[in-house]
Image (cartoon, rainbow, N blue to C red):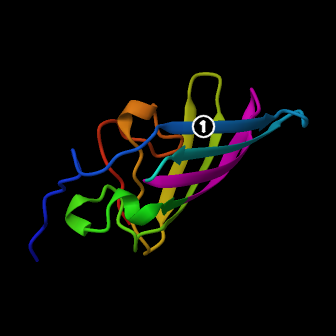
Amino acid sequence: MDMLEADYHHNISSKGLSVIGLESKKFTAIDIEAWNYYLDNISNSALLKIDRNNDTGFYGGLMYNYQTPLNYGGAENKLHTYHSADEPTHLISAQLGHHFSFCDVSLNATHILNTGKFLFLREFGVDLIYTFISRSQIEG
C-alpha cells in the first residue's frame, strides 16, 4: 500500500483556534475536566476527563476524546486535507496507579477505536492523554 504524503501546507486555511475548558474540584478527591478545541475549518475535539487523586494510596483516571473533522478537514481533496473527512476519532485513555512513599507506580493505556487517528498539533501544547509520548503520533 502506497502512503500518500500530506500536502495541506498552503492548501487549507483557518481563522484560528478556540479553546474552552471547565474544571470542577467540587469533590475532595475527584477532578472533572471538560475541554473543547475548535480549529476553524479543520477539526473539533471534545474531551471529558475524570481523575481520582489522593496524596497517598490509589489514584486513577478515565478520559474520552471525540475528534471530528470540519469542512472535509480543511479541503475536499484528500491530498490537501489535514484531517480526513471519513476519520472521526473516538479515543479512550485510562490510568490506575499507587503512590508509595518512595515512588509512583502506574498502569496507563490508550485505545483509539477503528475509526481514525488522533491528531493534536504540538504547537497547541501537550496531549492530555495518559500515555503521552513526546514527538509522536498515536494512530488507531
Which of these two is toward me, 62 or 38? 38
Which of these two is toward me, 17 or 129? 17
> Which residue range is magenta in the image?
42-66
Residue at numbered disc 1: 19
In the picture as drawn, the residue positioned furthest to the top comes out as 102
Residue drawn at the location 45% of the way across and 52% of the way down: 41
Q: Amino acid at mark 1?
A: Val
Left of 64 or right of it: where is 50? right
Looking at the rendering, which quadrant does residue 122 occupy?
A: top left
Quarter of the picture containing the N terminus is bottom left
Relative to 91, say whether 35 is above or below.
Answer: above
**Horizontal and vertical percent position of residue 120:** 42, 45
**Horizontal and vertical percent position of residue 77:** 25, 68
Residue drawn at the location 70% of the way across and 41% of the way down: 59
The answer to whether residue 94 of the structure is visible from this angle is no
**Mark 1 packing: few (<14 Cα in 10 Å), some, or many (20+)?**
few
